[in-house]
Amino acid sequence: LHPTPMLDELEKGPWPSFISGFKELAERTRKPMLRGVMDQLEYSYNTKMGYWKGGLVTVDGYGAGVITRYSMIKDKFPEATEFHTMRIQPAPGLHYNTTMMRQLCDIWEKYGSGVIALHGQTGDIMLQGIEQDKVQACFDELNQAGWDLGGAGAGMRTAVSCIGQARCENACYNNLEVHLKLLKHFVGALHRPEWNYKIKFKFSGCPNDCTNSIMRSDLAVIGTWKDAIQVEPDEVKAWIAEKGIDALVNQVINLCPTKAIALKEGEMVIDSRDCVRCMHCLNAMPKALSPGKERGISLLMGGKNTLKVGVNMGSMIVPFMKMESEEDLEAFTELTEQIIDWWDDNGLDHERIGETIERVGLKQFLEGVGMDVDINMVTRPRDNPYFKAKY
Amino acid sequence: LHPTPMLDELEKGPWPSFISGFKELAERTRKPMLRGVMDQLEYSYNTKMGYWKGGLVTVDGYGAGVITRYSMIKDKFPEATEFHTMRIQPAPGLHYNTTMMRQLCDIWEKYGSGVIALHGQTGDIMLQGIEQDKVQACFDELNQAGWDLGGAGAGMRTAVSCIGQARCENACYNNLEVHLKLLKHFVGALHRPEWNYKIKFKFSGCPNDCTNSIMRSDLAVIGTWKDAIQVEPDEVKAWIAEKGIDALVNQVINLCPTKAIALKEGEMVIDSRDCVRCMHCLNAMPKALSPGKERGISLLMGGKNTLKVGVNMGSMIVPFMKMESEEDLEAFTELTEQIIDWWDDNGLDHERIGETIERVGLKQFLEGVGMDVDINMVTRPRDNPYFKAKY
Amino acid sequence: MSSPEKKWKTVESGPHSYEEALHPVVRKNYGKWKYHEIPKPGVLKHVAESGDAIYTVRAGTPRQDTVDMVRRLCDIADKYCDGYFRFTIRNNVEFLTPRQENVELMIKELEEMGFPVGGTGSCVSSVSHTQGWLHCDIPATDASGVVKSMMDSLYHEFRHMEMPNKVRLSTSCCSINCGGQADIAVVVKHTRPPRINHDNLSMICELPKAVTRCPVAAIRPTMVNGKRSLMVDEAKCICCGACFGACPSMEINHPEHSKFAIWVGGKNSNARSKPSTMSIVAHNLPNNPPRWPEVTEAVGKILSAYKEGGRPWERVGEWINRIGWKRFFEETGLTFDEDMIDSYRHARSTFNQSAHVRF
Amino acid sequence: MSSPEKKWKTVESGPHSYEEALHPVVRKNYGKWKYHEIPKPGVLKHVAESGDAIYTVRAGTPRQDTVDMVRRLCDIADKYCDGYFRFTIRNNVEFLTPRQENVELMIKELEEMGFPVGGTGSCVSSVSHTQGWLHCDIPATDASGVVKSMMDSLYHEFRHMEMPNKVRLSTSCCSINCGGQADIAVVVKHTRPPRINHDNLSMICELPKAVTRCPVAAIRPTMVNGKRSLMVDEAKCICCGACFGACPSMEINHPEHSKFAIWVGGKNSNARSKPSTMSIVAHNLPNNPPRWPEVTEAVGKILSAYKEGGRPWERVGEWINRIGWKRFFEETGLTFDEDMIDSYRHARSTFNQSAHVRF
Ligand code: SRM
Ligand code: SRM
Ligand code: SRM
Ligand code: SRM
Ligand code: SF4
Ligand code: SF4
Ligand code: SF4
Ligand code: SF4
Ligand code: SF4
Ligand code: SF4
Ligand code: SF4
Ligand code: SF4
């Protein structure tokens, strides 16, 4: 390895160091690409500029999934000439067994650099550092082991799910299964992107939204329930006995966003009709309270980050849908297809679906996709009289 | 009187009827104008259309204060040919003694119809129904009795104050006096309007804002305080003893917008640093709590109703200013002059100051008037990185 | 208008002076009030640091008053209040006296004269309203008539304090809404683009003024019968009526197509929640003189639901924020429709960008 | 790239299947969990309706891992968890076992290997971050390096639950912010309009694409040295960098003029308050490799103030909503300036349209 004094600074301190990891890998495997990339990175640290440019590499039949990187200064760092990433879709919920993971590592070490990011922000396993001429072979071997490429470009993207029903008592639907089936359904649009821009799904089991779906997915599928919160009165009493009335008032009652909880002679009384399913009281009293029994999902649309419009959170579009049977899932799949079709027809180039809805108007969007209006879609009716209705 | 079957319907029911009032007046005074106007009004009730058009009538040296109305159908209702309104500025706080009020009535009956609106939404006494050739004489007599015309057109408008320190324990400044002096200061701009558009002041003694200043005045002067809420511990105890802990929690603690009040062993604890001076706990416990001792005003700017932009509430521009001495008032007067000058220079025709600020940007407005930025002006710093600073 | 005989030199005094209009007890305790109570509907008791108390009796008026009515009010003030009285922001009249024994006497006399005593505390106070057909040059209805009709049906609510908190109403005769926003506001809503009176237009209107007045740039210059005139792009027009104020030939008013909308949740006080703008909850209500029963009915539905379901201190908008708009529409029997979704400048900020949901 | 020898026919399977990746106890109790506890930092205990319990040990990773590291994690999973493990949304690794006795053994072994155990409950979890100079084609900095530097100083906070509530951090290497918003986000902020590389532009960029990409229409076609090129109206440009993504010749990155901004109060969960977007609280921080001390310092100030002053359950943004932005700036020592006032599309909705005020 060449000297990398800047990067070496990042080996100090208690937090695990990616630089130490790279060095260990480079020293063991002696892969020149790793040395080249570290040299170029060191150079970036010195000059405060990046030196990669994109290109186009795919695997047979696919139009996306490999992020291509060519060094802009390969004369300086010929070993860093190519450093492409393969995006790989993990299992929903990011679950692994060691057999599948070891196999993945072995294939990756065989063809690529051995650097892996677990995971990319969209949810992919990112295998970072492979040369163009090894991509197809690497992919074929991965694919035989049950792995497939993730999304990139103007199409469906890789999705993310929270751990959901695998471990969490709050999960209101089987998000792992819905994720699996929906992404299989849209797999063509993922591999061969040809829309206006990207579309991302994220699946959170409940409104705690542990996948941040509202902020970073065009289609956020969030578990919820329709009936009353389930209460275990004894556990409520035990909670109050342990923590006291002050805690009940200051940490539960007073934090309910819609004042759905009142104090009544030392007890908490939830008026479920006022509840907006924010999760707080359930989070505060996990033994005592749980979601109702009539469970399903809400669909929020239009989440995306910053570019051009500022952070845009997803908006409530489908307040409630059952998500238990095959038919439920089919109905949902159809709806999302319809929505995406509408967007593909009406959107502009590089316009996310949330931007399209804002531009044409929510009413026009609903008419376009043939959905009924629901008051849950807005925080309030309009405060200006500026519309012309069809009377 | 001619038959007015439609209007007569409005004599039914328990609420005092303006039609009965008009009839009584018309019958007693036999003023033909009253009959003509009632006939035209009856006609409007039948055709569902209005029939007045504007014109221009003023008094010597003034450019505003008389709202001119000519009948568009004077052939039908010649008695209604002219029906002008004189806007008269009352005393701040809408206080009267019977001597001044009887005098006003007498003058008005002498020259005009005898119809009075107490009060117009902007705060004027509206003397409704006078002919052009009587306006000057009527005004002269009113003026000798201490009355002056109110505002109209693109200038300073008549102001409104709540009852303030005259009766209210919440009043944080002498709003009647400030109202009086400021409006005297701007009296030229009120009588001879020559700005882009109107400017309205309203003066509320505290954030309860009993004048609705935030919604309907360009310059809302709202009393407030800087230090801690004053607490009478015994009265708090008495309140709790009378109403109970549940009421304390559900009606006071849980309604504080910033959770500045906590429950601690059956007592309420206000953390004044978290208080935003919303008034609620003071309203709920008037004997126990009162505003702090370091009192003054906040200035909110840009309130106006609906036209073109939708309801636009005033925004916090001056979070705090003392308003006790002559110097305080002078400083405030200067500031408002400066602000109005800026607006007059930078506003478009028919653009209220709130619209101008929104169009050019708050930062640019502050630079324009030479004010420092204060975090109280906004609910939060920006959520997008889209600015180019001077570094 | 300047008359040769004029002798009086105008004094530009601005507002009338107020000190002479204050009751001596008020003057004495000015700025030194300590707390208040509301002993009964229509009556306030304010206690000063000095120990002095002043009693206020409040009564409703039609606002469209006459010298006769006002003189009767003066009589009361002379008889019971040492010659002082005032009006409130909402057109109610107030009589202040330090003598408690006068309170009941005044109430009796006022009610006998037809002035209902009330309007304090958690009640429905008088309606702030506007000129209408009686005087304005751009009205589509008569606010005073609508208000009289509504208040007849809310007479009990004015005189009792049975609401969760104060209820403020307003009524306006065009979309400009001089009446202002309120807990419940009744406002004219134009439903069609203006018809253009081309004959008048070129004569009486400044064309560029009307063009720039339109917030959505729907007005364009054109030629009609060889004269310069204007045309409206009806697809763009949002029926705001702004052009009509600039140019009477942009005829926005229509006996059938100018309707009423009902708005709720306007709140101007800073108590608890921040001031909030009102939301539309009904439109296309007919403009139906002389009693506008449809308006009274809709307002009545809202008030019954609020009275029934609101908690202490909740203003109408706060009540709705707690129970949710969904239940608001259910409980009032009104219907939410797609036109109630905001589509104007800051529409995105009304989208429900959360998973907070109500069923 | 298609190779003649290819024998394997691609299976477009999409995500990997998950059932085989679930621990048998997880599979058995799937969808039937009852409640959870956090016995200590980095450890979760979930109890199922069946009475089964599963213990989770969570540890931090650098995210930029290697096959060597991953194999070491597999070793742990084989030894203590029957061969199963998973990752969290925030790049932490989780080991699930029904055997309570394995918990402490795992903690010991993981920490010895350099993987800190923690990241649960009211702590500072790992930072979601992005590619940076290591891989992206448009970065102004190296997110991984910034994160390593920050987490060194927050090591204690990751391993203890001493915060009022969860703290989520993110770091992004350009304004696009692939890292997403968070309680505290460190994001590159461009401070100058792009310089245009006219030589490259005509060769490698689609001109109309760059023109339409600009949200404020600051880009105009022009001719430079006889070739079609673009120019930027610098008065309009808001330094968003959108054009750079469309056209590498719009060079927005600069070693000195691409800076850092710090953002706070981003919240994505629906717990209590609605999800909220984050707000800028510092900008013009230098891009200072290899350890970016200015960034770590600013983040540290915010975290100390929050740790000190936050109440149970208050996320950073909720804490600020209670204490107010004024005190936030005072207590963190950061400075509010006029550029932090929103000036973008919905700026008006950030004005303080109330008399709610803090001193
Ligand atoms: C007399 C009057 C001021 C004036 O100079 O005219 C007035 C007087 C008082 N107001 Fe007011 N308010 C008056 C109009 C208003 C208005 C404006 C309006 O009515 O258009 C508002 C804002 C309404 C809004 O938000 O849209 C107003 C919002 C309040 C509030 C806050 C209510 C709330 O919870 O939101 C209080 C606090 C309270 O009720 O304890 C208050 C409290 C009071 C107190 C109790 C203050 C005091 O300690 O003396 C006074 C008696 C109130 C009562 O009637 O119960 N006053 N008050 C106005 C009477 C109007 C009427 O005749 O009905
Ligand atoms: C008389 C009055 C209604 C009433 O019956 O009380 C009134 C009546 C008119 N208003 Fe108003 N406004 C009256 C208070 C208001 C208020 C309330 C207030 O001042 O507190 C508002 C809302 C607050 C505001 O200033 O925005 C108000 C917002 C308007 C607007 C819309 C302004 C805007 O920027 O959106 C206009 C239109 C205009 O100015 O072009 C307007 C215009 C008018 C005109 C001049 C109509 C016109 O353009 O020809 C009306 C004259 C009617 C007449 O025949 O007398 N009036 N107007 C009120 C004035 C009486 C007084 O002097 O005391
Ligand atoms: C493992 C993980 C899901 C996954 O599939 O990967 C997860 C798991 C749990 N989350 Fe989460 N959350 C996870 C990311 C998130 C995220 C997203 C993120 O971190 O980027 C959020 C949204 C953050 C935001 O608002 O920006 C999130 C918001 C919550 C909340 C709401 C917190 C709040 O008060 O705002 C809860 C409720 C709670 O803490 O009791 C929660 C609760 C939980 C519980 C207690 C649910 C349960 O009963 O099992 C789990 C253990 C939490 C713990 O660590 O204390 N989880 N949780 C994620 C762990 C991330 C990590 O390694 O640090
Ligand atoms: C790799 C990754 C960051 C990471 O290190 O984790 C990433 C990297 C890039 N993102 Fe991203 N984004 C990544 C997750 C995100 C996320 C988070 C998410 O998906 O949850 C977002 C915010 C959410 C969203 O979708 O808005 C995100 C918002 C963007 C945007 C802005 C989109 C917008 O509409 O505002 C762009 C720009 C674009 O698409 O033109 C972008 C573009 C890019 C590009 C393709 C830059 C470019 O245009 O050339 C980056 C390629 C870097 C590389 O060399 O690999 N990336 N990007 C993440 C994908 C890994 C994966 O597949 O798992
Ligand atoms: S989103 Fe809800 S269901 Fe999913 S892990 Fe978080 S708390 Fe559990
Ligand atoms: S889930 Fe949220 S909204 Fe519902 S009762 Fe609990 S705290 Fe209130
Ligand atoms: S605004 Fe405040 S000071 Fe004025 S009357 Fe109302 S409560 Fe009293
Ligand atoms: S005045 Fe309002 S913000 Fe201040 S403590 Fe009382 S209720 Fe809370
Ligand atoms: S609301 Fe409209 S019609 Fe009524 S008085 Fe005001 S401007 Fe005239
Ligand atoms: S009514 Fe309003 S939108 Fe329509 S043309 Fe006139 S000004 Fe324009
Ligand atoms: S934040 Fe910007 S520079 Fe960093 S990975 Fe994402 S697109 Fe690339
Ligand atoms: S940086 Fe943004 S605002 Fe500036 S020219 Fe490029 S796209 Fe336009």
Image (cartoon, coloured by chain):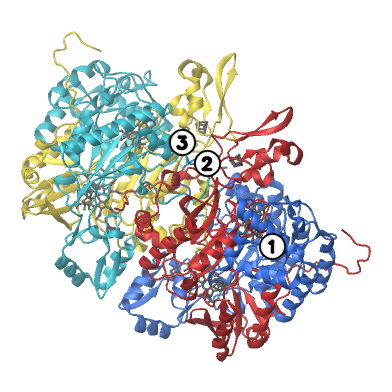
Chain colours: A blue, B cyan, C yellow, D red
Mark 1 and mark 3 in contact? Answer it, CB < 8 Å.
no
Quickly name the residue at label 2. Answer: A387
Mark 1 falls within which chain? Answer: A
Disc number lying in front (2 or 1): 1
Horizontal side, residue B74 vs residue A360: left or right = left
Q: Amino acid at mark 2?
A: Phe
Disc number lying in front (1 or 3): 1
Q: Quadrant of residue A199?
A: bottom right
Quickly name the residue at label 1. Answer: A2
Identify the element where label 1 is drawn.
loop
Q: Measuring from the top left, give residue C288's x and y in whole percent.
A: 42, 40
Residue C240's disc is none
Residue A186 in view: no
Disc number lying in front (2 or 3): 3
Q: Disc 2 and disc 1: Cα gap in Å? A: 68 Å
User: Is the residue marked by circle 2 packed among few (<14), some (14-19), or many (20+) residues within 10 Å?
Assistant: many
Residue B359's disc is 3
D66 is higher (above) or lower (below) than B30: below
**In front here: A122 or B48?**
A122
Q: Disc 1 and disc 3: Cα gap in Å? A: 57 Å
**In front here: C316 or A218?**
A218
Q: Mark 2 CB in 8 Å range of ligand 10?
A: no
Identify the element where label 3 is drawn.
helix
In the picture, which quadrant includes the N terminus of chain C? top left
Residue C230 in view: yes
Q: Quadrant of residue A317?
A: bottom right
